[in-house]
Each structure stands twice: as structure tokens, then as C-alpha cells.
Image (spheres, rainbow, N blue to C red):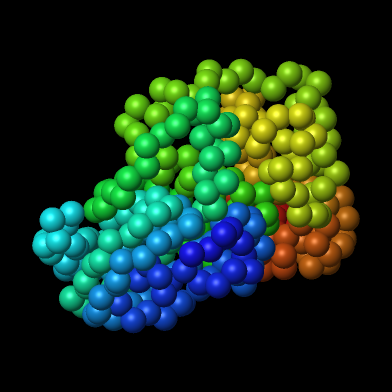
Amino acid sequence: MFQTITASHESLTPVISPGPSRVLFSSREIDFPEPVLMERYLCEAGERVEAQLDAHIVSMHLARSTVFEQRTPLGQFRNIVKSEGAITLFPAGRITEVKVKGPAEFVYCAFAPEYIQQVMEEEFSGRAIPLHIRTNLHDIRLRQLFERLIALLQSGAPSGRLYVDSLTHELAVRSLELHAERAAAYREKISALPPYIFRRVAEMLRANLHARIRLADLAELCGYSRAHFLRMFQVTTGVTPYEYHMQMRIQHAMTLLTSSASPLIDIAAACGFSSQSHLASVFRKRIGTTPSEFRRQL
């Protein structure tokens, strides 16, 4: 139905929703990776007709238990009860007819086929993973990733592109692992980044505390694929590039609070936070106090 999925493309909600629907949040409104579309929507009782998708979709049910009727290969309908957090995987291709008997709320992430193919090559040594519709799955990791992405959608993604890139990549990898139970065994053993390359990455992160930086920028600097770089960085530091960058930003904020009388709004901007309140929120979570209180205690 869509040749590629980008932030500027039309919503897929009318295609995959099991009933009349209304989009609550869409990634088209914020800085989201181009091969990915994410939306949260509410649907009423109704029916979804059979359709073709040119995107891989991971969907999570957000409402209380809801009864669905899904058409079987024999043409009959069978009841499925989905509880909160239930995951459905739709590979690109045909999606079957389904009916929903009451209102329900969902969030989904749609990936362009080229993006999924690239993840297979980078994360699973190019091994082709059979993709089939899977429904009513419950997976703690996918639920956590969706919850973080929902928070980003609702907040306008103040944490920046690096965080969004990392979360959507992890979501794609985890969905492929669920498609094939042994898929994780296909992944290569990863070593740490060579010290000189890590220093180069750290310098780039430090030089861009106030700016947005993408996972692809860091990977290109090192000459690795995004997936390979991400795993090597985590082996090296124990955290993601986003988390490491955030630690740098907080440390720089503490230095400025200690050594200057700059207004908090200027410190927030210098450290890459979208606002003074964003700085205060992150600072309190990590340091246990607000920037103002930290400065008064000096």
C-alpha cells in the first residue's frame, strides 16, 4: 500500500485498525527516523477488511481486555481475547479480516521493508528470518520499549534523535527475535571499540553537548554499521550512546552550576536540553535534587 514509510507519509491506522479509528499521537509531528512511522490510536467496535501492507508492523494493545474475532485460513471466525500489553506482529504482505466487539486503544510502529532487511543483515549475520503474523504475544522488553516511545510521542521527543534511533532499532531487533526463537543465536559475538575509535566518538559527543546527534552520525565516524557500532559501544561502556551522552550533559551542567553564575535557561541550552524544565526534570532524576538546589548547596 505504501512504497516506503516515512514521517511524511499518510497514517496506516485506517488500514490496520479493527474498527473506526482516531489517531491520538503520530511520529509525523516530531523528529522521528525516516524509515519508521509510529502512531497511537483509539478504535471503536467494527471490522477490518483484508488488506495488503508494504510495511512491517509491531502493534501493542493498550486497553483493558477486548474480544476480537479473527478469520481463520478455513474462512471461519474464532474469538481472541487481548489483554493490556498484548503484542501483534504484522509482516509486510496480507493482513486478515478481523472484528472487534468493543472500543480498544493501540500503539504501533511501522518499519519500511528495507529497514527490516538492513537489521537482519546487521544483527543476524544476513540470515533470512521467516516472518509470519503472530498475535497475542506478551513480551516485557517490547512493552518497555513501547512505553518509552509513547512517552516520547507525548512529550515531543525532547531527549533528541539519538535516543529515538536507539529505541526504534531495539524495537525492530526484538520483534525479529520473537519471529524466530533462535534468531538471537545468529548474532555475531561483539568486541569492544578500539580505544582510539572510542576516543574519537567521545570527542564527537563532547563537542555536541548542545546539538542533536544521530546514531548514524556516530556509526559513520567509526566506519561501522549502526547496529554493529551500537553493540560495540555498549560492550565498551555498559550503556547506550544516548545514556553516555546524557551523562556528559549532566556532568557539564554540574560544572557550569559550580563555576559560573549563568542563568539556568542558558545552562540548559548549553547542555543540549530543550528547556529549563527539561534540565530540572532530568537533573532531579539522576542527581536527586534540582539544579537550583544543587547550586544553593555549594
In this rendered view, identify the residue nearer to me: 6 or 92: 92
Horizontal side of residue 212 vs 115, given as left or right: right
In this rendered view, identify the residue nearer to me: 263 or 71: 71
Residue 292, by quadrant, is bottom right
Q: Is residue 242 visible?
A: yes
Horizontal side of residue 140 vs 204, given as left or right: left
Up/down of 275 relative to 199, above or below? below
Residue 18, by quadrant, is bottom left
Residue 196 location (% of width, % of height): 81, 21
Q: Residue at x 45, y 77 (%)?
A: 23
Residue 3 location (% of width, % of height): 57, 59
In this rendered view, identify the residue nearer to me: 134 or 221: 134
Q: Residue at x 83, y 35 (%)?
A: 203
Q: Is residue 254 visible?
A: no
Horizontal side of residue 195 vs 30, given as left or right: right
Up/down of 286 relative to 38, above or below? above
Q: Residue at x 41, y 81 (%)?
A: 22
